[in-house]
Amino acid sequence: MHLYESKANAEKETKIRLEKEQKGQVVHKKHHGNFSNYTFNKEEFLVEIKSLMEKRHCKLDKTCEKYDVTNTITGNKPQNAGQVLFMFAKANGIDIMSLINIKTVSGRDILRRKSGILLVHNDEYYDTLTEDKIRQRLQLLGEETNASCQDMRLKLKVIERTFKLKMWHDHSDILNHSYVNFMTTILYDAANFMTDNENQTLARTTSTTNVQSIVEKPQLYILGRSASKDIDQISYTEARIEDLKQLTNKIRYGDIDLIFKLRLFSGDGPARQFEAGQQRGGLID
């Protein structure tokens, strides 16, 4: 996962911004507005947050849901109610950030999270398969079986250890700043993951789980500052090409080497044109 912009540039821009605020050249932005414009039990909220701070335990989502934050001007519940409460606590000397654990997730970790529905076998498993078992499995996957037993064995091993990726990206504004967001997901394939029925049988339950929806949950790949111009979005092409080259390196999962290939792209018209190279972007084959 990539998060742009660089730390050096971010520190430089922040320093310049703070200096201008101190000199009164720019006004400090308050995306939450004035706290007097919101109604909620402020005293009770502060007491609870302080208590959670002492316990070093804080479930922000559940805590924020308890307080009915309402904008007194519009009468509506603000979409950034969590931010309002967060900044209100900060304004009262409570650093909630110290309780938040920030984690990064690697591709290998993503696979581990899907391990319950993942079909990955070691070499010994394939060596013990009979020719009939291999042929049945290949036919189930819609593959040709007019080859020798050893060739079919190798073919099945490669198919079941090859994963396909889908890419998506779009451009949007967040808090008056332009960003480009790239997401990626593993495509569901019965060669790599259990079917709904297989998972239901293994779990010994009558309820059905949509395995494909679990597998194809999008993961953040790149989030970066970028204007809407092509030249700005192209600035991320080099990093993406380098990552594509790295896909030729197999990912070690336990004692098994897995192969990942980028196969599909989804997005709106301009994004598809950019991805195809119509707008001076394009990727390597």
Image (cartoon, rainbow, N blue to C red):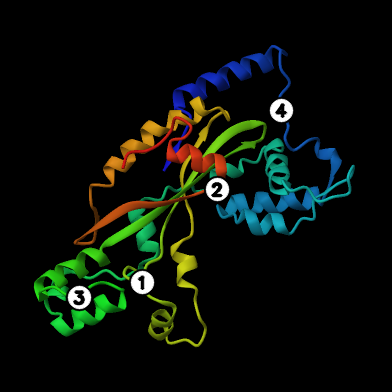
Badge 2 amino acid: Leu
**Mark 4 sits on what residue?**
29
Quadrant occupied by the C terminus: top left
Q: Nearer the viewer, mark 1 or mark 3?
A: 3
Q: Is residue 137 left or right of residue 25?
A: left
Q: Earlier in the sequence, mark 2 or mark 1?
A: 2
Marker disc for residue 61: none
User: What's the distance in space between the residues labelled 1 and 4, CA to CA?
Assistant: 50 Å
The residue at 46%/61% (across/down) is 216
Tag 3 residue: 145
Q: Residue at x 65, y 53 (%)?
A: 51
Q: Earlier in the sequence, mark 1 or mark 3?
A: 3
- Dots 1, 4 in contact, CB < 8 A: no
Q: Residue at the spot x=48%, y=29% of the render?
A: 5
User: Given the image, on which type of amino acid does mark 4 rest?
Assistant: Lys
Q: Nearer the viewer, mark 1 or mark 4?
A: 1
- Left or right relative to 98: residue 138: left
Name which of mark 1 and mark 4 comes first in the sequence. 4
CA gap between label 3 and label 2 equals 57 Å
- Please give the residue where the numbered disc 1 appears in the rendered image: 190
What amino acid is labelled 3 in the image? Answer: Thr
**In the image, which is nearer the foreground, mark 3 or mark 2?**
3
